[in-house]
Image (tube, helix red, strand yellow):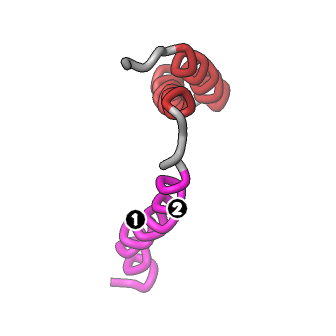
Amino acid sequence: MSKNQSSFTSLPRTLGATLMVLLIPALTACSNLSARERNTAVGAGVGAAAGAVLTGGSAAGTVGGAAVGGVIGNQVKPKK
């Protein structure tokens, strides 16, 4: 096994650790959002994912999906 092959096998572990370090502060920062702000963020995330899938990963499709999803999420009335 060469040195390059060894570095490629440790890439997923390093990437996973990096994502965890970045996601933990991001998730805790959202703990005090209002219901409307939370719905907007969730809508934007779902819209971005849907836009990326539907357009084959196009940046314009991802941004467009995020914008549409954010607007829809913002307009959803939370149950009381």
Q: Which residue is mark 1?
A: 16
> Looking at the picture, does residue 58 appear above or below residue 26?
above
The earlier-in-sequence mark between 1 and 2 is: 1
> Looking at the picture, does residue 58 appear above or below residue 17?
above
Q: CA distance from mark 1 to mark 2?
A: 15 Å
Q: Is residue 70 visible to us here?
A: yes
Residue occupying image coordinates x 47% and y 15%: 77
Question: Would you identify the image quadrant in which residue 44 lies?
Answer: top right
Q: Position of residue 49 (x, y in %)?
A: 48, 31
Amino acid on which disc 1 is placed: Gly
Amino acid on which disc 2 is placed: Pro
Q: Which residue is mark 2?
A: 25
Q: Is residue 2 magenta?
A: yes
* Disc assigned to residue 79: none
Q: Residues within 10 Å of mark 2 (few under 14, many from 20)?
A: few
Dominant secondary-structure state across the stretch colored magenta: helix
Residue extending farthest to the front is 80
Report how many numbered discs are placed on residues in the image. 2
Residue occupying image coordinates x 49% and y 27%: 39
Q: Position of residue 57 (x, y in %)?
A: 54, 32
Q: Position of residue 47 (x, y in %)?
A: 51, 24
Quarter that holds the C terminus: top left
Question: Would you identify the image quadrant in which residue 70 lies?
Answer: top right
Q: Residues in magenta?
A: 1-29
